[in-house]
Amino acid sequence: MLSLLITAMIIMMISILLIIILNFTSKKTILDREKSSPFECGFDPKSPTRLPFSLHFFLIAIIFLIFDVEITLLFPLIISMKHNNMLIYFIVLISFLIILLVGLFHEWKQGALEWTN
């Protein structure tokens, strides 16, 4: 246990040392107006360079990814059905589905699933 702790501390110290060295030796320069502005034939752009981003769309995409990953966690339960005790299998399956449904109802109650306010 002590050797594992020492190894972890050595790895952390090497990582921190490398981060510090790379931050000092990188070719970062102070950002000025010319370097941070988009290039448009030498003129200032007439329209904003970035389109407005819908935060609500981003939240729905994150919720979809979370539930998609959780659904993929259900697939190994189908394969392990023939190797497990059926009572334990159904307890695990029902508890997992209840956690998914509680999360879905929580998001629904918070209004994250409604597209318009």
Image: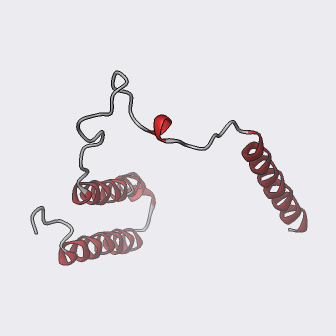
**Residue at 37% in and 24% down:** 42
What x and y, as percent, mark residue 105? 21, 75
Residue closer to the observer: 68 or 60: 60
Quarter of the image with the C terminus in it? bottom left
**Residue at 69% in and 36% down:** 27
Q: Residue furthest front?
A: 43
What x and y, as percent, mark residue 67? 31, 59
Q: Is residue 26 positioned above or below 56 on the image? A: above
**Residue at 90% in and 62% down:** 3
Q: Looking at the rendering, which quadrant does residue 38 occupy?
A: top left
Residue closer to the observer: 79 or 71: 71
Q: Looking at the rendering, which quadrant does residue 5 occupy?
A: bottom right
What x and y, as percent, mark residue 69? 37, 54
Quarter of the image with the N terminus in it? bottom right
**Residue at 36% in and 75% down:** 91
Residue closer to the observer: 80 or 108: 108
Q: Is residue 20 positioned above or below 114 on the image? A: above
The tally of labels here is 0
Q: Residue furthest top?
A: 41
Residue closer to the observer: 34 or 61: 34
